[in-house]
Amino acid sequence: MVQPIFSLADVHYSYEKTIPALRGLSLDIHRGERTAVIGANGSGKSTMLALLDALIFPDAGSMHFDGRPITPAAMRDAAFQREFRLRVGYVFQNPDVQLFCPTVREDILFGPLQLGVPTAEIDRRFERVVDLFKLAPLLDRSCHHLSIGEKKKAAIASVLVIEPEVLLLDEPTAGLDPQTTRDIIAVLQEAHKNGKTVIMATHDLHIVEEIADTIHVFGTGRAIIRSGTSEEILEDREFLQNNNLVHILVHRHRHGGHIHEHVHEHIHEHEKGVEDSKDSKDSKESN
Ligand SMILES: Nc1ncnc2c1ncn2[C@@H]1O[C@H](COP(=O)(O)OP(=O)(O)OP(=O)(O)O)[C@@H](O)[C@H]1O
Ligand SMILES: [Mg+2]
């Protein structure tokens, strides 16, 4: 059998030894696979990504990358650490954690410089990501004064510029406008075509099918409660509803002067829509 790029076996992790975040997580991720992890707030998605990026390590259980154990000792080996950082890139949920240089330009260049990528190669990649996200007007700006969407783009660019073979992305499209969301979907599809492995946490179920083949669902017990193809999981509305992954909305439509209500599931996570629908319940039919 082909060796997985990442393999987690019965991983447990608690913050400060007292706040459980993962309880018995096992999964294999294969090269070139596109994986989405979904689940309620606090179910352990970001924690899993931090483990995969070797920022934290399991309290119990094991994790392997390309057949090699990932442990604090393994990461203290400078050669291995450099190889790992070149091969695995992580886009944090919060771009403020990712961006710390005085300007966007320096933030994008930081990773490749730190990892010793040759200068000519850095120039080529820099131009590519700047073009991709149309970042030219922002390069000399301070990251702290960018809009949230601009920060997110700069953060993703600062990881893509390393050209890692595995991309870990935490909520890559949260808070982005439709065009920027499309841009990111296109970037992830391109990465997939080039053989990259993409692992992402997301609440944006309406785009999952375009960017993931496999979905793992995290439950409140902080372990995977179900895994399957994107199609299979997204089609199981009952399961999604029972696990609080889709909203039930009451939509109002005007037909011939009357307003009718239809109940249907809503796959976005926008709370505003839910509030609107609650209001609309009160007026069954109006003119
Ligand atoms: N730095 C931290 N210190 C203490 N507890 C933490 C820390 N980060 C996360 N936790 C806790 O660990 C659990 C899992 O959190 P995690 O951030 O992995 O969830 P998540 O699925 O990514 O949630 P969200 O959808 O809100 O991003 C939660 O109970 C959370 O409160
Ligand atoms: Mg998270």
Image: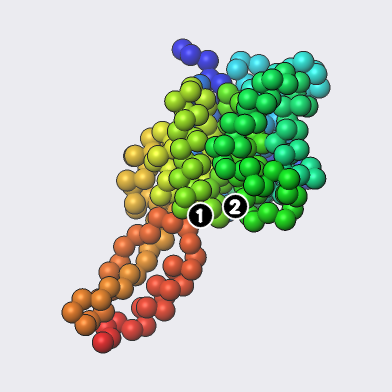
Q: Is residue 61 above or below residue 287?
A: above
Disc 2 is placed on an element classified as helix
Label ID, residue 149: 2
Quadrant containing the C terminus is bottom left
Looking at this view, name the residue that lies furthest to the left: 256
Q: Position of residue 187 (x, y in %)?
A: 50, 36
Disc 1 is placed on an element classified as loop
**Mark 1–mark 2 CB contact (< 8 Å):** yes
Q: Position of residue 124 (x, y in %)?
A: 63, 25
Q: Is mark 1 within 8 Å of ligand 1?
A: no
The answer to whether residue 46 is visible is no
Neighbourhood count class around disc 2 (C-alpha, 10 Å): few under 14, some 14–19, many 20 upward = some
The answer to whether residue 208 is visible is yes
Camera-side residue: 138 or 238?
A: 138
Q: Position of residue 148 (x, y in %)?
A: 63, 54
31 displayed left or right of 60: left
**Which image quadrant for residue 169?**
top right
Camera-side residue: 27 or 281?
A: 281
217 displayed left or right of 253: right
Neighbourhood count class around disc 1 (C-alpha, 10 Å): few under 14, some 14–19, many 20 upward = few
**Which image quadrant for residue 230?**
top left
Task: Say what amino acid the circle numbered 1 marks.
Answer: Asp
**Residue matched to label 1:** 177
